[in-house]
């Protein structure tokens, strides 16, 4: 097997190694490596990994593998070549792909450009908000850009106010099979704001419900005009959505609301959403803008303001920590566009990443349809992931970006000072669970591992309910996570020096 590692990738790893460990991995203050009692380990290890899985009796399929990081030897595997949905564990591969194609110091750029001259505070031309694929752009950043335009003397725009989001292809929903109202499956394009989520808040008064939709941050709370909500007297469905003349038009069942509350809803028109909020923030700074319109092509002009993201390495660390799907899709498609030509679709970008993973990491049996793992149509094998983890560990690329995985006792309580240290990425869908990363045994032996579990028959049946958490999903996923820990403890017992 020929594993290829680019110079940019190695530099990304060196940069990660140079960053403080506490900032990147959230290392606990207390050591996690006291010596484990041999008798306790032997009891846990009896029967091998197959015995652990059989005794647990988790419905569905289980695929797992483990390898020694130093030698690269594969030590154990149960159905390790079976392709299963990786869920958010897929974000590991997306991170490696982005680091290789873009570099760890890459920054995403959002700009405001003018197509004409600014004379006496008046722009005699169009003002264009240009998205550059930044998944972390928020309301505060847009407000800062509006403030910089004001300081530059802009007061009025005589032309149009345009939004360009064509740096990446438009995707209506990351996974079209998800219910419309779930904020973790928003639209994707070359511009995003607040992870393409709008805040919905409701309170019950004497005359019915009062609702508000806004793009809130810790500093601002601008209302939005491109989305609206109506409360209707009904039982089901809880939410409905339609595109009404360029507006995200929502309804909600009154019986589901109670006296008050709030939640985030997905945005289906990212460009108009960003333009709507920027229009409000500019007005607050005394700048009169026309109603936002979408630009099909990127105009040329003079830059008036810009917003730069944190380095990609930090964007990826936060993506892995919070498992943000939009970040994964925008970063993955940006990596696919690094050669100069944007991918034609999300699926095409994911296929390009799969080919890259096969060519560079030996992941020949991995076939992704997205970059986040939200779709259950993606397939990854435990052996593929472990092979990749061994390779990248040698270059110090990934582990600093992963967060510690908490070990728990039989009652689900956190175990302080557990003798096995785990740095990993979790993945969870209804009736799908994954875990992949690195474990360190009490004597310091480091192993790469991957565990994928899925009850696809139950998942298929559960989709008919359109519930966020269908019946049976919560206990199944809980049991799957318990199995993951049992396997980690088993490997820690069997494969230390």
Image (cartoon, rainbow, N blue to C red):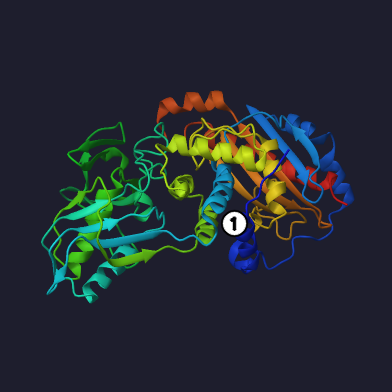
At 58% across and 43% down in the image, what residue appears?
89
Relative to 168, 377 lies left or right? right
Left or right: residue 467 compared with residue 313: left
Q: Secondary structure at mark 1?
A: helix
Q: Which residue is mark 1?
A: 8
Residue 411 visible from this viewpoint: no
Q: In which quadrant of the rendered view does residue 22 lie? A: bottom right
Residue closest to the eye, 38 or 437: 437
Q: Residue 323: where, in percent of width, then height?
A: 51, 49
- Work out whether residue 321 or residue 36 is closer to the camera in this orientation and state it: 321
Depth check: give the residue in front, 258 or 83. Answer: 83
Q: Is residue 26 above or below residue 412?
A: below
Q: Hey, which quadrant is residue 62 in on the image?
A: top right
Question: Where does the N terminus fall, quadrant-wise?
Answer: top right
Q: Nearer the viewer, residue 206 or 402?
A: 402
465 relative to 61 in the view: left or right: left
Estimate how packed mark 1 is, as few (under 14), some (14 to 19) or many (20 or more) residues with alpha carbons within 10 Å: some
| Number of numbered tags placed on the structure image | 1
Q: Is residue 380 visible?
A: yes
Whether 461 is drawn above or below 390: the answer is above
| Residue found at x 60% / y 40% | 357
User: Whole-percent x and y of residue 185?
Assistant: 40, 41
Q: Position of residue 125 (x, y in %)?
A: 15, 60
Q: Could you tell me which residue is drawn at 38 percent across and 41 percent down?
A: 182
Residue 45 in the image: x percent, y percent?
Answer: 83, 40
Q: Is residue 258 above or below residue 442?
A: above
């Amino acid at each position: 097997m020929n594993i290829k590692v680019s110079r940019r990738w190695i530099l990304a790893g060196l940069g990660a190694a140079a960053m403080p460990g506490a900032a990147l991995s959230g290392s606990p203050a207390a050591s996690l490596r006291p010596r484990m009692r041999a008798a306790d380990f032997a009891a846990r290890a009896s029967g091998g990994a197959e015995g652990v899985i059989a005794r647990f009796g988790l419905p569905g399929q289980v695929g797992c593998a483990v390898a020694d990081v130093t030698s690269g030897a594969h030590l154990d595997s149960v159905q390790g070549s079976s392709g299963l949905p990786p869920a958010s564990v897929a974000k590991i591969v997306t991170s490696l792909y982005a680091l290789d194609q873009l570099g760890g110091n890459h920054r995403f750029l959002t700009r405001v450009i003018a197509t004409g001259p600014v004379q006496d505070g008046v722009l005699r031309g169009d003002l264009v908000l240009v998205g550059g694929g930044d998944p972390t752009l928020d309301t505060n950043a847009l407000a800062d850009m509006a403030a910089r335009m004001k300081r530059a003397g802009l007061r009025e725009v005589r032309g149009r106010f345009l939004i360009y989001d064509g740096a990446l292809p438009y995707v209506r929903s990351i996974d079209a099979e998800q219910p419309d109202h779930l904020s973790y499956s928003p639209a994707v394009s070359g511009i995003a704001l607040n992870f393409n989520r709008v805040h919905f808040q409701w309170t019950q008064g004497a005359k019915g419900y009062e609702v508000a939709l806004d793009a809130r941050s810790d500093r601002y709370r601008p209302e939005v005009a491109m989305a609206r909500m109506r409360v209707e007297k009904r039982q089901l469905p809880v939410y409905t959505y339609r595109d009404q003349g360029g507006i995200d038009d929502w309804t909600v069942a009154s019986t589901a609301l109670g006296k008050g509350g709030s939640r985030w809803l997905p945005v289906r028109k990212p460009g108009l959403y960003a333009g709507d909020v920027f229009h409000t923030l500019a007005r607050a700074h005394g700048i009169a803008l026309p109603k936002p319109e979408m630009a099909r092509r990127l105009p040329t002009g003079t830059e008036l303001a810009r917003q730069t993201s944190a380095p990609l390495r930090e964007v990826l660390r936060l993506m892995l920590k919070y498992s943000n799907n939009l970040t994964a899709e925008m970063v993955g498609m940006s990596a696919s566009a690094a050669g100069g030509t944007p991918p034609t679709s999300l699926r095409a970008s994911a296929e390009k990443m799969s080919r890259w993973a096969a060519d560079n990491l030996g992941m020949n049996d991995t076939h992704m349809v997205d970059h986040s793992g939200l779709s259950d149509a993606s397939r990854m094998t435990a052996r593929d992931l472990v092979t990749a983890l061994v390779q990248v560990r040698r270059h110090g690329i990934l582990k600093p970006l992963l967060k510690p995985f908490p070990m728990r006792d039989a009652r689900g309580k956190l175990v302080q000072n557990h003798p096995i240290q785990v740095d990993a990425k979790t993945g969870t869908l209804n009736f799908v669970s994954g875990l992949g990363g690195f474990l360190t045994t009490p004597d310091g032996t480091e192993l790469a591992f991957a565990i994928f579990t899925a009850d696809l028959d139950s998942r298929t049946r559960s989709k008919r309910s359109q519930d966020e958490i269908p019946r049976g999903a919560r206990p199944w996923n809980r049991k799957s996570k318990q199995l993951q820990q049992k396997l980690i403890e088993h490997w820690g017992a069997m494969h230390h020096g």
